[in-house]
Each structure stands twice: as C-alpha cells, then as structure tokens.
Image (cartoon, helix red, strand yellow):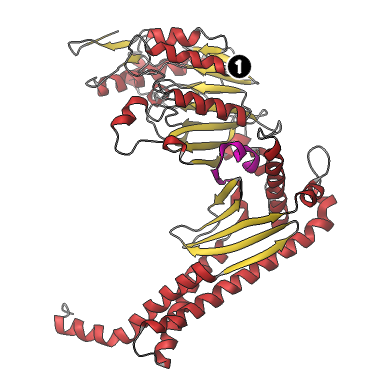
Amino acid sequence: MGVPTRAQAAALGHRLSPWLLPLLAGMLGAALAITFLAHEDARVGPATVRLSARPAIKGSSRLAVPPFGSMSARTHLGPLEFRATVDDVDVGRLGQLLDGGPGGPRFAELEATLGPLERQARQAGRDFVIRIALFGLLGGVAAVVLFPRRTRRRAVRCGLGGLLATAVLLVPALATFDVGAFREPRYQGALEYAPALIGDVRTGLDRLRTLREEMTLIGRNLDRAYAALAKPPADLGNGTVRVLHISDLHLNPAGFDLAERLATQFEVAAVVDTGDMGTWGLPPEPQIAANIRRFDVPYLFVKGNHDDADMVAAVAANDNAHVLDTSGVEVAGIRFFGVADPTFTPGKGYRVEQFEKLKEEQSVVVADAIEHRALRPDVLLVHDGRLASYARGHVATVLEGHLHAFGTEVVNGTRTLRTGTAGAAGPDSLRAADPPPSTAEILYFSPATRRPLAVDRITVGPLESSFSVERVLLPEGETPFRADPVPVPPELLRTPPTTGGQVIEAPDGTTRR
C-alpha cells in the first residue's frame, strides 16, 4: 500500500470528524465534571470525610488532615487522583475508640466496633465511585453545548466520549487499588506534625491486609496528631532506633537549624554527618562546627573532600562529636564504622578521574578493615560512595553523601543510602538559577537485625516554602545480614593502596599525598 495522498487524508478526516470531535468534547466534559462536581461528604465513625477526585498523571490517593498537612501514596495505576479531606473529627470519640492501654487495642477486642466502620467506609467508597461514573457520563453529554448544532446524535457521541474517559480513569484505579500503599506515604505539611501523622515505621510494617486494620493505623496516627496540638513533640514509641543522616552542610547555618529540629521532632538516637561541612578550607570555616554542641545526642562525623584538617579538629572539639577515620562507635546497639575521604579538593580544576580512581582503590582497604574488626560493623559511613565500592557485601548498610541527591541501591546484600545536601549546597546555591532544597534522611533501624527497615526522605524548599517527607520501606531490613563480598579485580589486589593521608591539589595543578 502506498502513502495516502493529501486528498485521501482529507477525505478520511472528513469522514471521522462527525465522531472524533464529539468524542473529544465528551472526554473533556467528563474530566471537567469529575474534577469540579464529583464530591461527596461521608461520615465514617468519628470523622466526616470529604471525597473528591481529579485526573492526574500518576494514580495516587491523598489524605488531607487540616491543619497538620496531608499524606499521599501510589495506591493504584491509572490517571486519577483520589482525595479525602477530614473536615470534622470527634476527638473524644476517636480517643475512646483507640483506647486500649499500652500498645493500643487488640483487633479481636475491636472487632465489634471496627466492623461497622469498615462497612461505612466501603459504602462511602462505592457511592463515590458511582457518583464519579454518573458525573463523567453527564459531563460528556453536556459537552454537546460546545457545538452550534446540538443534535441527538451528536449528544450520544459526546456521551460515548464521556463514558470512554470515565472508563479510562476508573477501571485501572479500581482494578489495582491497594490501601496498604499508605505504609509508604509521602507527607506534606508542617514539620512539627510530620512524626505524629506518619508514625513509627514499625506500625507500617505490620503486614496490614484489611481495610479495617488500615483504618486503625490511620486512626492511631490521627489521634496522635491531635494530641500533638497541645504537645508538638511526638512520642514515636520504642519499636525502632531512629538516626538522622545529613551531609554536605557546606557552611550553611540553616542546615544545622533544620537538623536540630529534625533530631528533636523525630527523637533520634544519633546524628550521622557524612562530610563536607566546609567548602573552600578558609580559616574562618571551622567556626561552623561549634553548632554541633546544640545536639543532645551523639554526632558521628566522617570527613568529606571539602573538609580540611582544621575543620576535622573543630568537629572533634565538641564533647558529643565522634570523628570516625578507620574507627567505629556503637550507638543504641548499632555499630557504626567510618572512613575519612582521602582527598581535599576545594574549588575547581582538580583531577576528578584521578581522585575517583584513588577512592575506588582505597575501598579495597576499607573492606579489609571491616573484616578485621573484632565485631563486624553494621553501618559504614563514607562521604563519596566510591570509598565503599569494594566494601559492599562486607557490611549491611552504607551511608554516603557527596552528590547532593537522594539515592539507594542494594549490591550483594548491602543497602546503600545516599542523602542530599542539608545545607542546600551552601554558597554554590547563590549562583544557581534554581537553588536546590535542603534535604536529610531519618533511618529506622531494627534493634533485632541492626539494619534499617525504612527511610524517611525529607525535603525543605528554599526559605522553608515547603516541607515534605517520603517514606521508603527497605524489606531486607527484616532479615539478618549475610556477608557476600563484591569480587575485587586482580590488579587492585596486586597493588593495594596505602592507608592514611590526604591527596591535596597544589597550586601548580599537581597532587601530593
């Protein structure tokens, strides 16, 4: 068959236009009707919830709880976002419902109470889906007003377009919806109430299978959040050991302010700083390290490639600081082992490939040092992940920074967690057209396996214009770590690098160790 001529294409378009335009108009009318008209107020137990939906790029559900903020999760596939806004809560009744002494009520004891709540929630959901379908169809038919000639045939075709759009929005969502996705929520709102609403990660790892149990989880967090109005610091319980991971402060005092607030609100056992507290190595820079004494918990630090000897000494001068350089410390039963970055490379023009190769070679020594510890460390701290290249498989968890961006992967059983820049890239952000946000991580360690069960990725916009927490579950954290070393190339085994010292760029562009 040949390529259609322009005349043939025009004829085909003329034949399709009586169908195509009404179908498109109907789809548009359905989307608008669902967005602006498909709302429903439902009473579920002690709360009144306003339900709404709208087309979206990714399928998700959002639970908004004024004034605390909102939680969202990727609950389904399909281009539709569901939203539930808690308009009114009988706080006293909610507290009575969840009052069961330490640890909360057992589900067997709550069966009679939670059964009606589950039925109310399911009925509200069914009614809302029917409302969405009805308004989608009506919106499609109503789109006929866009045409000068509003014939019955054209109205039917618009209605078919509305039906098609409604099916595209609803069918994938209903077929794949999983309320358990709220075990990995994304929170947006005020920092003070984030720990209260998202709760301790142990609650979210309970293999929740039913809507009834999920409602209990959300109800407990809601009850905790209302209690936080009078007492903002939330009691997260003792199910996990929480650790704050920051990096790349780069002389930004606001980064310390954020870290102090996070350490307090999330009640962490320690702060881990994976380096680059400084930037250029200028004499006044070490003064920033005095902020470390503001923390009431141990502060673990490894040197980054922008930290000189004076900065390291200033960090070590704080009573609560532990500078780790091929050394370790135990906090709350978790064994941390740190290795300082072997380079000091402020400014531009340093030999990136040379330094990256040096760190990769040094990682062989790091792996050997881990194996020769009397007790195997649980967590390896490095600034640049290349220092852990061949240490993976020797240690359960690696924490790193350097790249100013979140990241994670599992290699030979080792979970690597990279945090962003708590200092919003420091002075470099002043030159950026779009300054990066301040970022940090909260890690939830299992006391049994001494591995992280989950991580909360925290992002704060410029001038604190926004605050969000995204929870990521780490399923391997529930099982003990088994060593599975990454194979080392023979050429690195033949010429192992020396330990200790720093590589420093000289004014003539050469390097010295």
**Quarter of the image where the C terminus is located:** top left
Magenta span includes 189: yes
Query: In the rendering, at what x and y percent does residue 378 appear?
Result: 57, 23
Q: Residue at x 41, y 91 (%)?
A: 153
Q: Which residue is drawn at 70% across and 48% down?
A: 217
**Quarter of the image where the N terminus is located:** bottom left
What's the residue type where badge 1 is placed?
Answer: Glu
In the rendered view, tell whether residue 439 sits above or below residue 53.
above
In the rendered view, tell whether residue 366 sits above or below residue 131.
above
Quadrant for residue 20, please give it: bottom left
Q: Is mark 1 on a helix, strand or loop?
A: strand
In the rendered view, tell whether residue 134 sits above or below residue 257.
below
58 left or right of 266 in image: left
Q: Mark 1 points at which residue?
A: 330
Quadrant for residue 269, please give it: top right
The residue stretch that appears in magenta = 184-198
Query: In the rendering, at what x and y percent does residue 491 appear?
Result: 31, 19
**Label 1: few (<14), some or many (≥20) within 10 Å?**
few
Q: Residue at x 56, y 28 (%)?
A: 261
